[in-house]
Amino acid sequence: MTIVLTHARAAALAAFALMLAGCTTAADPQPAPAPSASGVEGLTGEQILAEARAAVAGARSYVFEGSRTVGRFKVLGRYRMVNGDTTGTMSMGGRITRFTILGEDQYLLPDDGFWEILAERPGMADAKREAAGRWVRMSTSDVTVERLLGQQAMITDLDPAGPLVKGKVFGSGGDYWIDMTSGTDPAWRAGVATTGKPYPTHWTTATSQVDLTNFDTEFPEITPPAEDQVVDLRELTA
């Protein structure tokens, strides 16, 4: 079953699915001499970003906080990823939904404002009343939150137009990163860790601003909501 919305609400949900924006140009950081444990400074810019994309794809866990602008909509999000599963919150135009995604199943707990978006879908006019405050379970193919909010969107961000320019190493207290910019896209800027694994720690693009922290932290496994607190999307649209 695919969620289809009408007019501006459809664009809103598409923006919600696409996640996260903000696009301010980062101020120039102040350099700090730092040792390198990963050796990425010796690589080309393209090689550094290839290492960063592979590192984030293989991470066991991290915390995402950022924004993405899609059209005239700005979506803010914060979530935790653990072994490929995610849980967190998203907001768009003051409308907020909590979400948990486990494999092919995703669960949404919308606030009243976000229910206004979902209610535009045919057959969903009374869905909020029928859901009665419960989480709504649906397939990831219904609303593609994870695909567009998660790792694939990040990897796309980390593959900008070149040539890439390596800057200086910055940081303190054992956390160091190399500054990366694009020779053709003045809005694009990223930092890649030079200690430990070459994780991308932060970046900005013309449409996004992202910070990643807590890589490989031993977070508890993400679990679904209690079954008595869940209603299936198909029951709301029957």
Image (cartoon, rainbow, N blue to C red):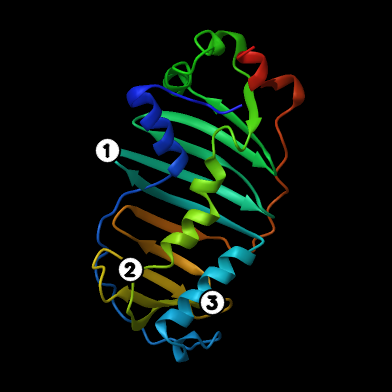
Instruction: Check the image and report above or below for 231 versus 18.
Output: above
Q: Is residue 154 left or right of residue 2?
A: left
Residue 93 in the image, given as x and y percentages of width and height = 34, 31
Crowd around label 2: few <14 · some 14–19 · many ≥20 (10 Å) = many
Residue 60 in the image, given as x and y percentages of width and height = 67, 61
Which labelled disc corresponds to residue 189?
2
Residue 55 in the image, given as x and y percentages of width and height = 58, 70
What is the secondary structure assignment of the residue under circle 3? helix
What quarter of the picture does the C terminus occupy?
top right
Residue at image point 31% right, 66% down: 188
Residue at image point 61% right, 52% down: 81
Which residue is label 3 attached to?
Answer: 51
Front-lying residue, 220 or 189: 189
What is the secondary structure assignment of the residue under circle 1? loop
Residue at image point 63% right, 21% down: 233
Badge 2 amino acid: Arg
Q: Is residue 155 left or right of residue 228?
A: left
